[in-house]
Image: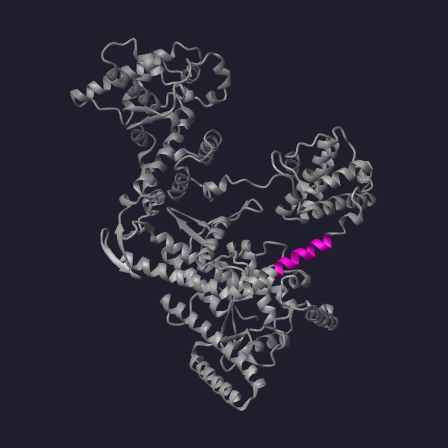
Amino acid sequence: MTVTTNRPAGSAPASRDALDHHRMLTADRGPFDDLSVDGVLELLPSLTTFPPATSKRNRSKRADRSRGTARILHWLLSFPGDGWQERWLVSGVDSGLDWDWIDFVTTEYGSAEAPRRAMTTDGLGCLLLARVVRPSYEFLQGYRTSGLYRHAKQEFGAEPFDKVRQAGLARGMTPSQLGTAENSLVKVAFRTGHDLDRLAAEDLIAYYEWSRKALGTAPAGLHAAWDLMRDAGLLSAVLPLRRTVARGQLSTAAMVDRYSIQCRAVRDVLVRYLEERRPSLDYTSLQHLASRLVGAFWADIEKHHPGIDTLDLPAEVAEAWKERIRFITREGKEPVPRQTRTAVLTGVRAFYLDIQQWALEDPSWAAWAVPSPVRKADTGGFTKVKKKVRARMHQRVRERLPRLPELVDTTEAHHSTQKKLLAAAQATNVGGIFDYAGRRYRRISRREDRTKRRFQYRPEMVLIEDMATAEQFDVTRDEDEAFWAWAIIETLRHTGVRLEELLEITHLALVSYQLPDTGEIVPLLQIIPSKGNEERLLLVGPELASVLATVITRLRGDNAGTIPLVARYDYHELVTGPPLPHLFQRRISWKRDVISTNTLYQLLNDTLARAALTDQTGDPLHFTPHDFRRIFATEAVAGGLPVHIAARLLGHTSTNTTEAYLAVFQEDLIRSYRTFLDQRRATRPAEEYREPTTDEWREFQEHFHTRKLELGNCARPYGTPCQHEHSCLRCPMLRVSPRQRPRLIEIIRNLSERIAEARTNGWLGEVQGLQVSLTKAKEKLVALDRSLERTRNNGRSGTADLGMPVITRRQ
């Protein structure tokens, strides 16, 4: 075995002081730690990889390895220690920094330098394979051999390693990816002294934590090794490694202690206050509150007024603090205005007022019930700030709503282009040349790839090169990114869900209600709340159903007809959910994961760059996921949906929140909706929220029958009146049936003729009304054709199978 190193030589071997530093490491010394030199040498023939004495050459190899092992053992005997492991640590070899010891061990022996060095390194390999010593990860990081890891796979369990290899092949790993994963398992086996089938999750996590601390990154191949151990049945862990070691929520005390509060009494009060507030807040809101109370308030007070130990602040201290928080100051940078100043003042005032209120019920708070340094007048600008925020939101909607069709068309066109390019490339053999869209491409192999994509290589990866520009493309990845960009934008604009809610949609969230009389299926989408506790159901329209069906078909096609189970890590709540059939998941190389927030923004930004949308000033027009939510709310209410119904669809607890989303409504219209709500609430008895009677349930079912229209179905919510006086052609709640396409074309033709007649006769008022109807009819025809085109592209001739559970008839 040939040894190469990648670490510089250090100082001389460590002294006896190193023994105390490594006492903890020697607590789990191996079973051969107390053997003599001869006893260790007698172990070597039992190694699976030790050369059998079947030929003269093998007998020579056996002798050389035994002599090399003996040399190292005799050298280790020169160091103090109780057993081989302690002597190994005291010698300094385990640090992985000093490799001159090999030369030192071999200098006293004769023959040429190369043979005696090879003899010593072979002996070191035998010592490690026999598990006489357990090397540290520092040592293994610097120790490189051409054959030791291959031998270790035999010594530490050939059958378990074969299971791991079969699991890797089943996942589609390349030999290099699989080899890296196996080598990481070998390192853990060397460090622990355990066979592969005896390794525990804690052993792999210990290697991960060492690498993160020492190298700043996860060990190469360890994530893959963890998954392969799970697949092979050698590890009982449920979640992937990256989810198992993901940072969890901090305790309230740890959250406060990040700011190093000097006064212990005040620190305890802050911890106790936040503990009281924690049950009613999500984790992100709790962090923001701690940042304002502890960081922006008390930590700043202690920094500028050392030694202060009371919440009862002198007037000059309070006024100085209120002036300082107007700006955010960082060392070496210019101060910038604090956008959240009003929120900080409001949080501090609430802190003092809450303690005063609690002191009336619990005397233990009385000692801290002091006047608030923040007066009510100090927070008077909060309403003004909210109005400014609302005005910016409205302006964003006004700018983006008219440009949404352009973004949708760009997304669909790009996905269609990438899909056709991938199909053309797949139909061409490696090295072959093909033409597409007026350009000539050549399909290349992995070895010709000049980019870093080779590290994420997959067997199905298709690489091509533009013959004119020599630019290379991974069309498999490009088509995948184009598909998910399309799916994300379509789902956001048809549902109005929040970003976190989108990523949490699973196949289990799709349910259906079957009408008992006609057997009609009404699809519903269950939305898990990301804010508050407003869980809700959304009616799935034809366009949204087509999108979700396409996503489900794609996931099933990549996983033998089933949707893979993956666990999602919530970066806001810092918790990992259980493995579920998430719909917005991707396969990257050999692993699957829910699309991350950063990836979602990247896909959205790439699409915006292709669309090249600009605002009135010519600046790029950016969209965020929440912009689609505001546009959804604006379009829904503008189409006649009552505000209180829109609030339920969006998961808002108050219609005031929904009204803030509506950019195109005048104050009198909002006022009329409020009057409508007040009147309706006055007529609705409190006992309304009871189990429905048989008659009420029958009325609910009949509602679906009355939705039947000439051109399709009406999707207005149950219990709401028609807002357009049955002018269905103009109503956004109309869902046109594909069977009625000829009828819709006939209506468009008839409207065109009527407009021409009205213009001839000078009926200008009639022209205006008919033009509105014609515009809406053409929009519905475009939407219907787009839906039919998706159906044809997905290979479905009729309805889409979403795989939804059906709600049975109520008995």
Give the residue drawn at x 47%, y 87%: 753
Position in image of residue 679 (x %, y %) = 73, 72
| Overall secondary structure of the magenta section | helix
Q: Quadrant of residue 495?
A: bottom right
The question of residue 393 being in magenta is answered with yes
Residue 337 placement, left or right of 575 = right
Q: Quadrant of residue 609?
A: bottom left
Point out the image quarter for the C terminus: bottom right
Residue 534 placement, left or right of 74 = right
Seen as rendered, the residue at the extreme left is 56
Position in image of residue 123 (x %, y %) = 30, 19
The question of residue 321 being in magenta is answered with no
Residue 705 shows in the view = no
Residue 274 placement, left or right of 522 = right
Position in image of residue 696 (x %, y %) = 63, 75
Residue 503 shows in the view = yes
Seen as rendered, the residue at the extreme front is 617
Q: Which residues are magenta?
A: 382-394
Q: Nearer the viewer, residue 143 or 515?
A: 143
Q: Nearer the viewer, residue 599 or 123?
A: 599
Q: Nearer the viewer, residue 640 or 232?
A: 640
Q: Nearer the viewer, residue 244 or 584?
A: 584
- Asked if residue 19 is positioned above or below residue 664 in the image, the reply reads above
Residue 476 placement, left or right of 602 = left
- Asked if residue 677 is positioned above or below residue 414 in the image, the reply reads below
Point out the image quarter for the N terminus: top left
Image mark count: 0
Q: Quadrant of residue 235?
A: top left
Please say which color scheme the image uses. one colour
Seen as rendered, the residue at the extreme bottom is 761
Position in image of residue 210 (x %, y %) = 47, 30
